[in-house]
Image: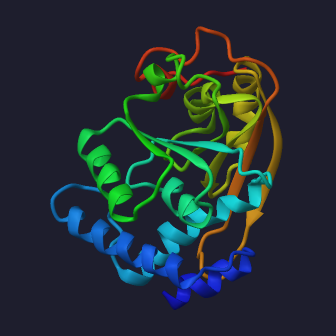
Amino acid sequence: MDKLHSAAAKLGITLTEEHLRQFCTYYRELVLWNRRINLTAITGFEEVQVKHFLDSLTVVRALELPPDNNFSVIDVGSGAGFPGIPLKIIYPGIRLALLEATGKKAEFLAHIVRELKLEGIEVVRGRAEETAHEEKYREKFSVALSRAVAGLSSLAELALPFAEVGGLFVAQKKGDIQQEIDRAVGAMAKLGGRLKEVITVELEELVERRYLVIIEKIGPTPADYPRRPGIPVKRPLSS
């Protein structure tokens, strides 16, 4: 894990031997399970270190963790656990929910949480459109994260309802995102959010430039949102 170790240091993260052992276990189990279920198209050892683990860790640039660890995170559309589990490995004190709609992927998440002996994690099987209306999860998290491939307007509708007022939604994006951000400003406002900052992530290990789009939650999300399953992606909110 030399590549991950050295690249993480550029983010200000010092990976210990225990961290690296956990990431090795994560990689091994990811590849084993990927033979049976479709978790990822990226399976090479160095590729996973960079495109999954390191890319997940870049979210630390958007976070200010309080010294008392009173911090809760939900990873919306977690898939194989990115970015939530890598973040939990380096910050074991945070409370983490991994939201995943696909049953087999949720099974993998529960398995890898056990294998890594991580505590303070809940694997939630469900769709964001429905789970975000449950009292247990609505506006209960310091930060909502998403690495899912969808437009920013759609992601905001799926994730912002989970963030508490005063909290954040951080979307990991890449490519030319300015037009996408411009189209999403109206959606953010309807959902109780406001664009706070866009952080550019440039690391030589990451071939493509990455962005962390940070949306602050300045007011409650109206009860109508998110809309019913499938609609946020099919008909994104506009200005």
Residue 234 position in % (x across, y down)? 46, 25
Where does the image place residue 96, in percent across and percent down from the top left? 54, 46
Tell me where residue 222 sits by quadrant.
top right
The residue at the point 75 percent across, 54 percent down is: 63
User: Which residue is depicted at the point 40% across and 28% down?
Assistant: 127
Q: Would residue 51 be found to the left or right of residue 205 on screen?
A: left
Work out which residue is located at the far bottom of the displayed protein and give it.
2
Q: Is residue 186 above or below residue 115?
A: above
Give x and y (percent) for residue 210.
Answer: 66, 63
The residue at 72%/72% (across/down) is 202
> Residue at point 39% right, 65% down?
116
In the image, residue 175 sits, relative to residue 105, either above or below, namely below
- In the displayed structure, would residue 74 be above or below residue 165? below
Across the whole image, how many numbered discs are drawn on residues? 0
Q: Position of residue 110 (x, y in %)?
A: 32, 49
| Left or right position of 218 against 81 | right
Q: Is residue 46 above or below residue 208?
A: below
Outermost left residue: 36
Query: Could you say which quadrant of the image residue 228 lies in?
Result: top left
User: Coloured how?
Assistant: rainbow
For the C terminus, the quadrant is: top right
Give 155 or 221, whichever is nearer the viewer: 221
